[in-house]
Image (cartoon, rainbow, N blue to C red):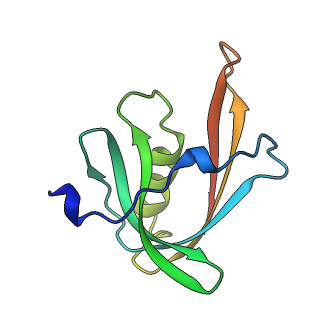
Amino acid sequence: MMADNLAPFIKWGSFRSIDEKNPDILHLRAVETQPFETQYSTCVRVKIRDGTTLTDAILNLKSHESANASLLNQWNKLAESGKIKHGAELTLRTWLGQSKYNKRPIRRFAIEV
């Protein structure tokens, strides 16, 4: 797959919440349910809502360099159960929490369909 054909990636660095009770919220629409591999990560095509506008985007589900598979696992579970399908509206909540073992920052996710 040519990188030139990809929509822009959603960049986690712009989401700075560190409070699980007040997370950053992304409103998404599923374009595809099946993740695909890039050189650096496992991703899926979505549309992201900005006000009333939907824009094509690539949602990074798991970086190959990270052990954090939470978002990928949640996505796959919801897709396999039929809750995420083409056109489904999703709310993705994200915040920076702490890892259980070394207390380093780790990105946390919760998907609602």
Which residue is drawn at the image coordinates 39% and 77% (left, top)? 86
Quadrant in the rendering for residue 57:
bottom left
In the picture as drawn, the residue positioned furthest to the right comes out as 21
Quadrant in the rendering for residue 49:
bottom right
State the image coordinates of residue 102 (x, y, percent, origin top left): 66, 12
1 on left or right of 70: left
In the picture as drawn, the residue positioned furthest to the left comes out as 1
Which residue is drawn at the image coordinates 36% and 52% (left, top)? 43
50 on left or right of 75: right
State the image coordinates of residue 107 (x, y, percent, origin top left): 62, 38
* Quadrant, the N terminus: bottom left
In the picture as drawn, the residue positioned furthest to the bottom comes out as 52
Which residue is drawn at the image coordinates 52% and 47% (left, top)? 71
* Quadrant, the C terminus: bottom right
**Residue in front for this viewpoint, 67 or 82:** 67
State the image coordinates of residue 65 (x, y, percent, origin top left): 38, 27
**Residue in front for this viewpoint, 13 or 37:** 13
State the image coordinates of residue 3 (x, y, percent, origin top left): 21, 56
Disc count in the image? 0
20 on left or right of 112: right
